[in-house]
Amino acid sequence: DVHTSVAARVFKVSEKEVTAEMRRRAKVINFGIVYGMGVNALKDNLGSTRVEAQEFYDNYFVTFPKIAAYFEDVKMRAKKDGFTTTYFGRRRFFAGLKSPLPFMRASAERMAMNAPLQGTAADIIKIAMQKAYAGLAEKKLLDQAHLLLQIHDELLYEVDISAVEKVRMVVEEAMEHAVEFPVPITVSVKKGQNWGDMESIK
């Protein structure tokens, strides 16, 4: 659990001592950093003071110095090239990086910091969708499993109740092995009669 792990290091406690509130705050910080969130936005999302948000922000980069170095590298490359690149080579251009207006440049920098990570995640889910479709076709399950929605890193299927386990195996395999990646990709699967009433499948 990356959020629990980060909470333990930021709050300087063992993972067993991490409370639900510590984990929530770590999650806000994790996603906030990835999205290029500034201290004021972090303050609002944490529901804290600006001083406390600044402390969280500073401690995060002290605890994880390579993340700060990575983002600086992304910004420098983006300013030099005018674009960022995902893990798979897809480019996104940022004209705002050369804007004479400071707020436009700052906005473009935040988007440039975010683009390689979010863009790579978007690439992976699209590859996973294609692999899941191919896997369902191979198992002759396309008439029993219909993809309804893709929400960020989630896929929502409507599945014939008799085929739930077969479909789960195919989709889980496709998502966890969509790409060969330096770190493992794991997924959790839930089922239910409707989207708001789901329970985990172990």
Image (tube, rainbow, N blue to C red):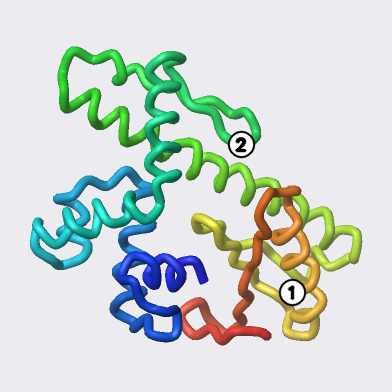
Which of the image's four quarters has the C terminus?
Answer: bottom right
Residue at horizontal 69%, vertical 65%? 146
* Circle 2 crowding by C-alpha within 10 Å: few under 14, some 14–19, many from 20: some
Helix, strand or loop for disc 2: loop
In the image, is residue 145 above or below residue 160? above
> Is 24 on the left or on the right of 174, as rendered?
left
In the image, is residue 93 above or below residue 66? above
Of labels 2 and 1, the one closer to you: 2
**Toward which corner of the image does residue 4 lie, by quadrant?**
bottom left
Looking at the rendered structure, which numbered label has been put on residue 168?
1
Give, as a three-letter code, the residue at label 1: Arg
Front-most of 177 and 78?
A: 78
Residue at horizontal 38%, vertical 58%? 30
Looking at the rendered structure, which numbered label has been put on residue 147?
none
**Toward which corner of the image does residue 73 lie, by quadrant?**
top left
Pinpoint residue 152: horizontal percent, then vertical percent.
Answer: 50, 55
Give, as a three-letter code, the residue at label 2: Tyr
Pinpoint residue 79: horizontal percent, then vertical percent.
Answer: 37, 18
Pinpoint residue 163: horizontal percent, then vertical percent.
Answer: 79, 79
| Disc 2 to disc 1, C-alpha distance | 27 Å
Front-most of 166 and 118?
A: 118
> Is 48 on the left or on the right of 108, as rendered?
left
In the image, is residue 75 above or below residue 8? above
Q: Looking at the image, tell me whether mark 2 or mark 1 is earlier in sequence order.
A: 2
> Is 73 on the left or on the right of 149, as rendered?
left
> Is 17 on the left or on the right of 47, as rendered?
right
Residue at horizontal 29%, vertical 20%? 96
Front-most of 98 and 142?
A: 98
Looking at the rendered structure, which numbered label has been put on residue 87?
2
Helix, strand or loop for disc 1: helix
Residue at horizontal 78%, vertical 81%? 165
